[in-house]
Amino acid sequence: MGVAPAAGAVAAKNILETLNKPGQIVYYGCPAEETLAGKVFMARDGGFRDLDAVLAWHPGSGTGAGNYGGSSMDSLVFEFFGKTAHGASAHMGRSALDGVMLMDVAANYLREHIPENSRIHCVIRDGGDAPNVVPAYAKVWYYARGKDRDAVDDLRKRLTQCAEGAAIATDTTMKTHRITAVYPRLPNDTLWATVKENLDLFGPPKASKKDKERVQELGYQGEYDGTVSKGMGSQGRGSTDEDNVSWLAPMGRFTMACYTKGTPAHHRDTTSQAVMPFADRAILQTAKVFAGSALDIILTPKTMQKARAEFKKGTKGFTYDPLIPKKQKVPVDPP
């Protein structure tokens, strides 16, 4: 994910110098994409505000230019504090785990009364050490997703009320904090069209017979998508921290086929295919799209002006809220 735009940035810079044309290419290395934290904290601390336009990508099983991004989301931790006791004398204790479990029951009932495009997911990160010891501490980690920030803000409020009620019912105490938070994407038709033109020009890598044989050894049919689609025409269910950046500069974003159709995301087979020669060639094709799109934006003033005008219209009356307090430390480790 990082190598392709880096190569594209270097290529665009070299071409600008060869043509003796003015322009500045900025490469942002963005860590912690999968935990939705990297760009959120970078944006909070002033990143991306130096850009006139921004380009982004993500590997996938298909190639296309998307313009609608993902769902708004909050990553939330709820901690419960009780009183430990031996299981044989459990009446002397107050179970923090009971607080977590009761909160999840309340969250399950809450799901019936939230918009259909909202989602609530959770895992228990700490639930105690032994069955015969009443846990004095427990922790649960939630993702709350919605169509936009207003929907997620309301969902977070109601989810917190579930936690507060569970704490009262179990005679425990509770505290919560937001690890990170993302916006939905602000679409930009101008940059979408620019990226799509370059995808049509360069295309995805071509799969060889050897490429297909390699993935067949993993149990797949070896079918690579060699077409270029328009990408998502509506908002996706997932979430990404790059959507925050779309509110700081007009964004053009695309995907490039790096593995076969049907390969599950976040899976060991995705990892295996990412180090195969086909994926190496996909990196080069991605770099070409980055370089070509960047040059089109810089060397065609009307494209930049149109993208900026569209961005200005979309952000009218909007003030970017980082959503994460300035004093909050970057989450290096899982909660």
Image (spheres, helix red, strand yellow):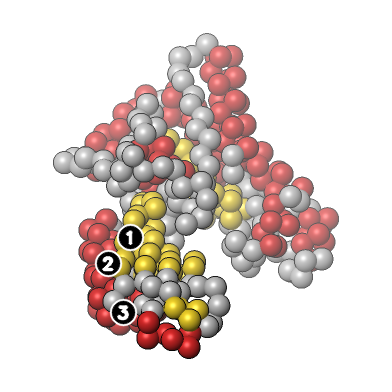
The kind of secondary structure element at disc 1 is strand
> Residue visible at 74% across and 64% down?
222
Residue 274 percent coordinates (x, y): 69, 52
The span from disc 2 to disc 1 (Cα, nearest Å) is 8 Å
Q: Kindly report the distance in space between the C-alpha atoms of the residues bearing marks 3 and 1.
A: 17 Å
Q: Where does label 3 land, which residue?
A: 170
Query: Which amino acid, by three-letter code, is at mark 2?
Result: Thr
Badge 3 marks a residue whose secondary structure is: helix
Q: Are marks 2 and 1 in contact (CB under 8 Å)?
A: yes
**Does residue 71 appear anywhere in the picture?**
no
The spot of residue 243 in percent (x, y) is 39, 48
Q: Residue at x 31, y 29 (%)?
A: 305
Image point (43%, 68%), residue name: 137
Query: How far, Cα to Cα, is label 3 from label 2?
Result: 15 Å
First in sequence: mark 2 vs mark 1: 2
Label 3 close to label 1 by CB (< 8 Å): no
In the picture of the structure, the residue carrying the numbered disc 2 is: 160
Q: Is residue 24 left or right of residue 269?
A: left
In the picture of the structure, the residue carrying the numbered disc 1 is: 176
Among the two numbered marks 3 and 1 on one chain, the one whose residue lies closer to the N terminus:
3
Residue 10 in view (yes/no): yes
Residue at 39% across, 58% down:
75
Apparent side of residue 75 relative to residue 32 in the rendered image (left or right): left
Residue 332 lies, in percent from the top left, at: 51, 46
Q: Nearer the viewer, mark 2 or mark 1?
A: 1
In which image quadrant can residue 232 be found? bottom left
Mark in front: 3 vs 1: 3
